[in-house]
Amino acid sequence: IEVDAVLPAIGLSTDLSFLDGITEDLKPKLSRWQTIEINPLTLATNVEGVFAGGDVVTGAATVIDAIATGKKVAVSIDRYLRGEDMAAGREALQPVAEPKVPRVQKAPRAKMPRLSPEERVKSFSEVQLGFSEEEAVKEAERCLNCGLCSECYQCVEVCKANAIDHNMREEILELNVGSILFSPGFETFDATLKAEYGYGRYDNVITSLEFERILSASGPTTGHVVRPGDHKEPKKIAWIQCVGSRDATLKREYCSAVCCMYATKQAITAKEHAPDIEATIFFIDVRAMGKGFERYYERAKDQRGVRYVRSLVSRVVEMPETKDLMVQYVDEEGQVKTEEFDMVILSVGLKPRKETEEYARRLGIEVDEYGFTRSKPFDIVSTSKDGVFACGVIQNPKDIPETVAQASAASAEAQRVIAEARGQLVRVLEKPPERPVTGETPRIGVFVCHCGINIAAVVDVEAVTEYAKTLPNVVFAEHLLFTCSTDATEHIKEVIKENKLNRVVVASCSLRTHEPLFQTCLEEAGLNKYLFEMANIRDQCSWVHSEDKDKATEKAKDLVRMAVARSVFLEPLYEFSFQVAQQALVIGGGVAGMTAALNLADQGFFTYLVEKESELGGQARKSIFFTPEGLDAQSYVNDIIDRVQNHEKIKVYTNAEVIDYSGHVGNFTSNVVVNGNKESIKYGVAIIATGAIEYQPTEYLYGENDRVVTQLQFHKALANGDESIKDLKDVVMIQCVGSRDKERPYCSRVCCTAAVVNSLKLKELNPDVNVTILYRDIRTFGTKELYYKKAREAGVRFIRYEPDQKPVVRSSGTGLEITVFDQSIKRNILLKADQLVLSAAIVPSPTTREIAQVFKLNEDADGFFMEAHVKLRPIDFANAGFFLCGLGHGPKFLDEAIAHAKGAASRAATLLSKKEMYVGGRVAVVDRKKCAVCCTCVRACPYGVPYIGPHGAAVIEPAICRGCGVCASECPGKAISLQHTTDVQVITKVEGLLEESLENILPSQASN
């Protein structure tokens, strides 16, 4: 093993050189270990008047042993010189007794399994491999049963985790529960099984999970991109996709659904760390079917310089001299190519954990041949056993947004089952009493975050911290790797208490995501949560000034100085409680809306369901007749309509429209117009499920030739068993019609599977028909990949086209002619068709824009509703009390929309289950003495909150105020101020930017 330095662990031996030259009669007797033999009681040697002790007697021992021996021999020497008995009154130290414990066999101490040194240098695994459960129990039994515990309880005192209980006995717990959530997680494919890629043999071939650790600031290289083999910075990195996925030889035919996007993310991140890196991704199909994924992929390709090569790599060979890697593949021209890379990353697939099958057996639930749970029709979070619900990858491979949404869905189903027991086991979280700080001189603590390398790779965090220490009123400043981690927030709480801080400034990322976390931290430390200020040195500094580290550091100092200046004038603010209206409003009577309403009603919450059309059912009732699994969709839709219409806790409005709203989370009021009549309703939360529609194509002769239909129209004909289907001889399908183009740069998610499933259905009805699918990427993700495989086996032909060489359609006397440039043979081919089927895009419903305007909800660039956070809050709106679900959020399969709706119901129930909530704090207040009743605030407020009260001044209800500050900024008489954003706070912050020395703008003894 090549290393930079060697640290030998050298043992000790007895130094007897002082005996050289001494006559034999004066030499002490030596033991066979070359130590001096002594009387163990007096420490006298065989030579009269000579005593010995320490390492020369015992061999290597501790300093404590040496001191104790020195004191003991001093007693012997004193008695010897006085002529006294050296052994009188002294007892020899007895060896520790070895107890004979019945029924316990003597056993050696267990040895901790460790990685070999050869493995350590090329692996990211822990060196200490840990004991198995059986080994750990065996070792614990050996020690606890055989040792003589004195019951001193010192182990209890020192154990910080409070994990030691002297009275504990083994027991089997029987829990009486109403429902179970099954979420055992996943593991990645063992890349050593793909021997052709050299994983485990070549140092610089690693898995995607290992590269994720390299990119991490807390990883083995602290975020610095280097090769594991020699720690050199790589210039060329290759990602190989579908390692352990879509592979029949491994009996893993399914797609792992996440690999394309995490490889793209890693390539972009690697180039952010080292812009000169050449990133190449070898792929079969790019499966960017999630919300926003297509844009991300296009940005990686066009703006970040990530190179995508459509090819399945055949093998990887290491160059012995350089440890570089030769990647062999067949390019799109059909030529065998070999290309050299510094590093190869294997995008390993996902699979259920090994223990999952045993867990499933114990719970009595069924799994498929791959280990994923089998669900009930239309309910992907269900299992084969009532009361047990599954979420996460155990159900099917999925990305983070789907995982989070379906986890909420599983929670909703669990809540539904045990709704009657709600609140019985609730424990109220107790916070320490708030420490009064009024009148105190500001004592500010500043915590600067590395944010891994998001900040620290650009900003000199240590320099910013040292600068913060020089600012007035700052009594404590330090930098932390991740200020938002649990350890860090616990540390901040201790610092607040120890230093009696009464203001806290965190310089890290965005208030939008992390302010509540730090405010809770302050509350748990006994401070009012509004005595907190945040400087965004990530979004506003390191991310936008990554090319100039010195200026970024100076700007970070400016931002911290501004935050400190403002924090001096922060004041404690207080909130008050109000009763929650425990009713829900659901807008949209499609499957998603009905599912959400039904789940809430089953949980015991009265729900208003508003549908614009005359009937419930939405697009599913009109357009979906069978699912990819072959289930009868219409029967399901009719059943759920019947259940909704007959539920005692659901009031259905059809031919209805919500025209306005007022109030705040937990207490809203809206007017609903039903057949021309207005009705007012009160509710605590709203779920928006407005759905989506099929794009009506303007290309490929659609609307001009009857032989050209959309995939939904063709689906309906197949479901009805139209006679015309049996007469078809040649059918051509064109994918991505209206999707993945400049006007709609997103993937419609369902089209590839719909085309494949419809092809299989057509083949079932008409075995002799020729079916050709013209595609860009086949995106049959997860176990839907099996339908793609079946289609190929059934003879369906797949021809790939590029977006700049789209198919050309012409009418002919006997049918249609489609010309397409086949990318495999690099030439135009002519296809004749009796029927042309267009896989048209899914586009937002026109109602989406109307509802967004009524409730002031955000839409994304494509016209779908925008969630609060694409990964972590995929069901919440940014507006408190509003949730979204179904196709109004983005394209989805029917079962996904159902799960999404249940997730929205779960999120809504977290609010509806509260009897009271708190409002106030950051709201506008009116100084009645200054109010001129000009009504500017009444006209300016986007939420219609201010009104002129009976006392001749504007009134702003704290419970309704959204804290936007429009009224405060528009008031010409400065009669309105926004708490927590007062004039003095804002002005001081601006002055803090302009003045390098805060002494010039802050009072000498600022206090609350």
Image (spheres, rainbow, N blue to C red):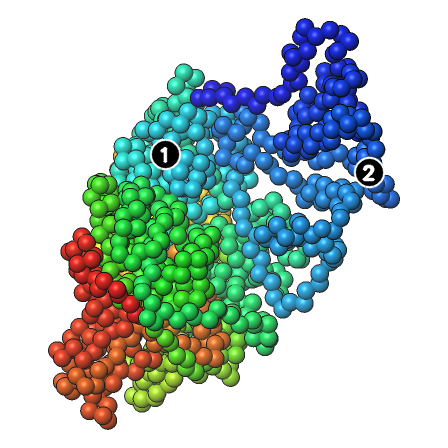
Quarter of the image where one finds residue 524: bottom left
Q: Is residue 709 visible?
A: no
Q: Is residue 983 left or right of residue 226?
A: left
- Which of the pair 198/516 is nearer the observer? 516
Identify the residue at horizontal 64%, vertical 67% (top origin).
Answer: 177
Q: Secondary structure at mark 2?
A: loop
Residue closest to the far front: 82
Identify the residue at horizontal 75%, vertical 34% (top origin).
Answer: 108
Q: Secondary structure at mark 1?
A: loop
Tag 1: amino acid: Val
- Which of the pair 194/501 is nearer the observer? 501
Tag 2: amino acid: Ala
Mark 2 or 1, closer to the camera: 2
Dot 2 or dot 1, earlier in sequence: 2
Q: Position of residue 487 (x, y in %)?
A: 47, 52
Q: Position of residue 275 (x, y in %)?
A: 27, 35
Neighbourhood count class around disc 2 (C-alpha, 10 Å): few under 14, some 14–19, many 20 upward = few
Mark 1, residue position = 225
Neighbourhood count class around disc 1 (C-alpha, 10 Å): few under 14, some 14–19, many 20 upward = many
Q: What mark, if any, has residue 97 been given in the picture?
A: 2
- Which of the pair 925/904 is nearer the observer? 925
The quadrant of the rendering that contains the C terminus is bottom left
